[in-house]
Image: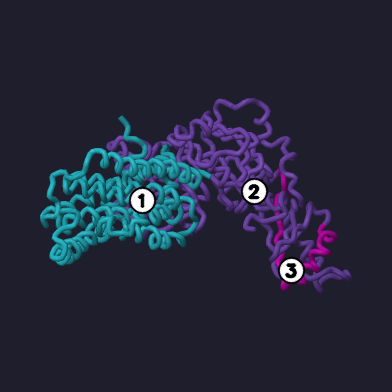
Amino acid sequence: MSAAPVPDRAGTETAGEAGGDARPGALVEARALTKRFGSYLAVAGVDVTVEKGEVFGFLGPNGAGKTTTMRMIACVSPRTDGELRVLGLDPRTDGARIRGRIGVVPQDDNLDTELTVWDNLVIYGRYFGLPTAEIRHRATELLEFARLTDRRDDRVDPLSGGMKRRLTIARGLMNRPELLLLDEPTTGLDPQARHLLWERLYRLKREGVTLVITTHYMEEAEQLCDRLVIMDQGRIAAAGSPRALIERHTTREVVELRYASIEAQEAAFARLPALVEGNGAERVEALADRLLVATDHGDATAARITEGTGSGSADGDVGPAPTSVLVRRSSLEDVFLRLTGRTLED
Amino acid sequence: MATPRALRYTGREIRIWQRLWHGSIFSGLAMPLMFLGAMGWGLGGLVDQNTGSVEGVDYLTFVAPGLLVVGAMQNNAGGALWGVMAGHKWMGGYHAAVATPLRPGDVFAGNLAWAALWSALMATPFMLVAALLGGVPSWWGVLAIPVAALCAAAFAAPLAAYSATQDSDVSFPIIMRLVILPLSLFSGTFFPLDNLPAGIRPVAWFTPLWHAAELARGATTGSIGLGSAVLHLAVLAAFISVGTALGVHTFTRRLTP
């Protein structure tokens, strides 16, 4: 259950890179990066390397230190300790230069809602000192990219959440950044808006833009990220590709069990481990509303549970039968649960 | 040459004003003009019947520069307090700006430049009307417009610096009532400072408003000496400089913690 995060590094992809000096190709290079607000340790020594052209993710629950790490990379929050290089430069001394070459999509769209879509792009472009003709050219192009061309002269305020987020992304691309930082890009969006946004982000990736995203949606991390780190309480609990993380830290499948009552779930939790042992099942975890059985053979484990519990069983003290049994593939959510004992939504 | 970073930020404020100018035109221009009509023209008639003149000029001429600087102070005090809170907390426009090559100090300075520019924009038609009513005897009166801008900045700078340290606006109405309103009334704006008891006169010397009122009146009447003009300017400049130093500090702490 306990995370024991930092020592468990051997074999992860960052550990392989950490041995040498700063790599010339790395866009972000952090070593023992630390951020303290007064006595509160928000980021407790984080090592990450983001390579050119990849989508890199910070996955973790709220309060894990993802946004703080992102703000340090974005050069809007000075680090307390550790090393940080962004585009090969030090944010302490070259913050403005770095900010001129990266794009930022903050968690809340801090757009000028009383102004038009077009105004927002133009004003932001001026912040970079771009010439007016170039600003107009890029804004026109990015409106197309964000599918907002027909809303060009509309005020931002009445736009949908998905449109605002796409505008914020377009705004963050005004300076043609080498690196785009997105903090919780799809939080608060409905599924349709989320998928459109992912599709736009894929396109950016194909065009060679390096993306760094934070998210607490494991589906988003699995869909988008080439590599990611799982953060918890200011530390990195694990690092690697989504597939590697799942293979390394959990079983192939998970059986989800729901029960008629909390008491029934507790009774089942006490007896299940003995019942499912073998069959490739490794462990049983209890969540507030369900039990999870990690197993390499989901169907066999599920069958064992349905046959071996409740009144249908020949044995004596077998525990209650679940009201529903679902077999699914393991996800990053299960990796997180395994490493921290908590869910991402906690 | 690239636009200085602070002025890039001013560009945002100008664009917002171009879209929403009607929101501030009443307090910025209509209100001072109504006061000019009621006090300078209406009340002034009574004053002039009784006293003949105030500091050697008719009451309209006396009060017009006072109203000009009071308007600049009041509007920009409110703008600095609530406007800055909107920028860092309610709307987040400052956070968007400092994610670019702009620094917190650029946002502060660009904002201050806008306060001064807006005040000059509002002061121009006001002075024109005052002149048409016969309240600006000297051509030097044109210089009252930049004085209004300086007065605006002298209040906006320290108050914006303060606003960036606050998490809510609860203290702002108190500042408006206990500092800004009394200053409006007792800084040699509506009547000469000499009419106040000698004991409290020195209080006015330490406020930017009295210096701005003296400068603006000296300009419209063309009667100020170089020495006093320099002294008044120096006080306004001191408030702007100290406020800016504080503001760069508080904006940096607030926007890039």
> Are labels 1 and 2 assigned to the same chain?
no
The residue at which mark 3 appears reads as A322
Q: Amino acid at mark 2?
A: Tyr
The residue at which mark 1 appears reads as B207
Disc 3 residue crowd, few under 14, some 14–19, many 20+, Cα 10 Å? many
Q: Chain of mark 1?
A: B
Q: For the residues marked 3 and 1, what is the alpha-carbon distance in whole angstroms?
A: 77 Å
The residue at which mark 2 appears reads as A40
Position of residue A109 measured from the top left corner of the image (x, y, whole percent): 44, 52
- Name the residue: 72% across, 44% down: A5
Which lettered chain is shown in cyan?
Answer: B
Relative vertical location of residue A290 with respect to residue B57 in this rendering, above or below: below
Query: Which is more foreground, mark 3 or mark 1?
Result: 1
Query: Which is more foreground, mark 3 or mark 2?
Result: 2
Q: Secondary structure at mark 2?
A: strand
**Label at residue A325:** none
Q: Which residues are magenta?
A: A248-276
Task: Determine if residue A226 is in view.
Answer: yes
Task: Confirm whether the magenta stretch covers residue A269.
Answer: yes
Task: Confirm whether the magenta stretch covers residue B132.
Answer: no
Q: For the residues marked 1 and 2, what is the alpha-carbon distance in whole angstroms?
A: 41 Å
Q: Chain of mark 2?
A: A
**Earlier residue among tags 3 and 2:** 2
